[in-house]
Amino acid sequence: MKLGRAATAWLGVAAGALVAGLLAGLLWLAQPTRSGHDPLTGTAWRLTAWSLDLARPASVEQTLVFDDQGDEPYYSGFAGINNFRGRVTVALDGQVEFGPAIATLIGGPDRVMTVETAYLQALAAVTSYRLSGDDLTLIGPDAIQLSFLPA
């Protein structure tokens, strides 16, 4: 049976969405556990506020998880539409470095995609963290601040 161009294109999009969904599911298989390496490993957070010029819609949930696999600490989370993951270095003196993130490639409304991109760029710029009670604040240059509460 020969498929038309539209059917072939639709099948390609559907297959891509299926692969992206499977990859997203794999990112969430490991449940965070407290390992004691640093104060962030084994914690899960939800973004509550940021200092960026872009208004953040209340309906957009963004999360951040710190965990490790043996000696390889990583961060992961949900950026609004896509899941992401990357390596992270967390120092006991409050310094943190987020490595490049890989993310699923699901598209969505332009407004949410813009917010998602801003979140991931802000994470990449973060250089330090502050824990105060149940609050986590990530801090970067140019007055970047991301505020989180436990998830």
Image (cartoon, helix red, strand yellow):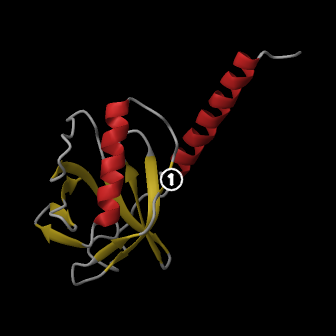
Q: Residue at x 39, y 61 (%)?
A: 32
* Residue 45 at least partly seen: yes
How many other residues sit within 10 Å of disc 1, few (<14), some (14-19) or many (≥20)?
A: some
Report which quarter residue 100 is drawn in. bottom left
Q: Is residue 53 left or right of residue 64?
A: left
Q: Is residue 135 left or right of residue 124?
A: left
Q: How many marks?
A: 1
Please name the residue that numbered disc 1 is placed on.
Answer: 27
Residue located at (35% from left, 44% from top): 116
Which image quadrant: the N terminus?
top right
| Nearer to the camera, 41 or 31 | 41
Q: Nearer the viewer, residue 36 or 63?
A: 63
Foreground residue among 109 and 22: 109
Quadrant of the rendered image containing residue 150: bottom left
Q: Quadrant of residue 120?
A: bottom left
Mark 1: which secondary structure?
Answer: helix
The reply, left or right, for residue 84 in relation to residue 119 is right
Residue drawn at (24%, 33%) of the image: 59
Residue 54: percent from left, percent from top: 20, 43
Side of 78 relative to 130 (left or right):
right
- Amino acid type indicated by mark 1: Leu
Q: Position of residue 128 (x, y in %)?
A: 23, 73
Residue furthest out toward the bottom: 93
Q: Position of residue 75 (x, y in %)?
A: 40, 63
Give me the residue at 29% from left, 82% from top: 91
Q: Is residue 43 visible?
A: no
Residue 86 picture location, percent across and down:
46, 63
